[in-house]
Amino acid sequence: MTILLRRILLIIALCVAPLAHAENTAPNMLLLGASLAKDSLVLVGERGMILRSTDSEKSWQRIETGSSAAITSVSFAADGLHGWVAGHDALILATDDGGTTWSTAYQGDNREDSFLDILVVNNFTIIAIGAYGYYVESRDGGHTWKARTIQDEDSHLNRITRAADGTLYVAGERGTLLFSADNGLNWQNISAPYQGSFYGILPLQNGKLLAHGLRGHIYLSENQGEDWTRVLIDSHPLLSVSYQLPDEIIILAGQSRAFLISKDGGATFLPWSGVKITTGLAAMIQSTDGKLWCLGEAGLLSLPTP
C-alpha cells in the first residue's frame, strides 16, 4: 500500500472536518501526533495545527506557526522545554519554551517532501523520517540539519521508536524494518517476516519487539528481530498505532474500528470491546494524570481504563 494512513486521514479531514479556532474548545479536527512537554500536553495536526493544554486537557490554546502545512508528529526532549514538530512541505519547527512559541528549524528545498515522524533521541540528536525514504537528522541539538539516505529503496518510512536500551527502530512500507544501536549513525536491516507495509515497531517492557502493519499483520520477536512469530487475530484491519501502558498492557489500533488489547506480553490480542470509536486513528498517549487519549480523524478522544 503506497498511500499512507496519515495522508488518507488528512484528505478526509480537509473535506469534512470543521476547524476549531477558539480556546477552551475540545479539539475536533484531524490530529496526527502528541507529546508531553514540561507542563502541558501538545497536539499537532492539519493546517499547521499546534494545540497546547496546561490544565489536564480542560482547555486548549492554539499556537500560531505561520504555516498551513499539515504537522504529522511532535517530540520533546527530556527537559520538556526543547521540542520539534515535523510535517508536510519538508518542514521542521522548534520550541525552547515547552511549546508556547515555535520557529522554523529546517525546511527542505523540495516542498513536496513530507515528514511522517520525528524523534528526539537525546540532547544532541533529533531524527525526522518520511515519505519515499526521506530522512533528516541533527547532531547538534537542532542547530544544523543534514539529509541522508539510510536504505537502498525509496520506501516510505512511517515511524521511528526508541527502546529502553537506546536501540532505535524504523518501520516502513515494502517490509522495511531497520535498527540502529548507535543513535542513528548506522542503520541495519532487520529481516522482515512480511513484505507489506509496517506502521511501527514497539519495543516492549519485557525486551521483546512487536511489529504491526496492514491487514492485521502482527509479529512478535524475542531476539531483537532475528526471528518473528505471527500473532493471529480474527480480523484484518490496518494497525497504525501501538502503545504500552506502565502495567505492560499493550494496545493496537487503527482503521476499521480496530482496537485490540494484549495482557500477556503480546502473545495474543483480543478485541477491546469497551471502546466504541469508529474513526481512523494516528496516535495514542497517556497524560501525566493517567488519562489515556487517542488522536485521529475525529480529533482527541478519551479511552477507558483497559
Image (cartoon, rainbow, N blue to C red):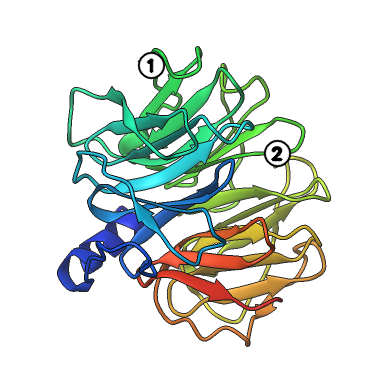
Q: How many marks?
A: 2
User: 220 and 61: which one is in front?
Assistant: 61
Please name the amino acid that badge 2 sits on: Ala
User: Above or below — where is 169 with respect to 289?
Assistant: above
Residue 76 visible (yes or no): yes
Quadrant of the rendering where the N terminus is positioned: bottom left
Which residue does the image show at 37% across and 42% down from the upper left? Answer: 156
Q: Which residue is mark 1?
A: 145
Residue 4 visible (yes or no): no
User: 128 and 48: which one is in front?
Assistant: 48
Work out whether mark 1 precedes mark 2 in sequence or the reverse, and give the earlier one. 1
* Circle 2 residues within 10 Å: few <14, some 14–19, many ≥20: some
SS label for mark 2? loop
Percent x, y of residue 250: 70, 64
Percent x, y of residue 42: 47, 50
Cα separation between marks 1 and 2: 24 Å
Which residue does the image show at 30% across and 66% down from the upper left? Answer: 29
123 lies left or right of 144: right
Please name the amino acid that badge 1 sits on: Trp
User: Above or below — where is 159 with respect to 7?
Assistant: above
* Circle 1 residues within 10 Å: few <14, some 14–19, many ≥20: some
Which residue does the image show at 26% across and 60% down from the upper left? Answer: 10
SS label for mark 1? loop
Quadrant of the rendering where the C terminus is positioned: bottom right
Percent x, y of residue 140: 50, 12
245 lies left or right of 20: right
User: Above or below — where is 72 with respect to 144?
Assistant: below
287 lies left or right of 35: right
Q: Which residue is mark 2?
A: 163
User: Above or below — where is 261 with respect to 91?
Assistant: below
Residue 224: give its label.
none
Front: mark 1 or 2:
1
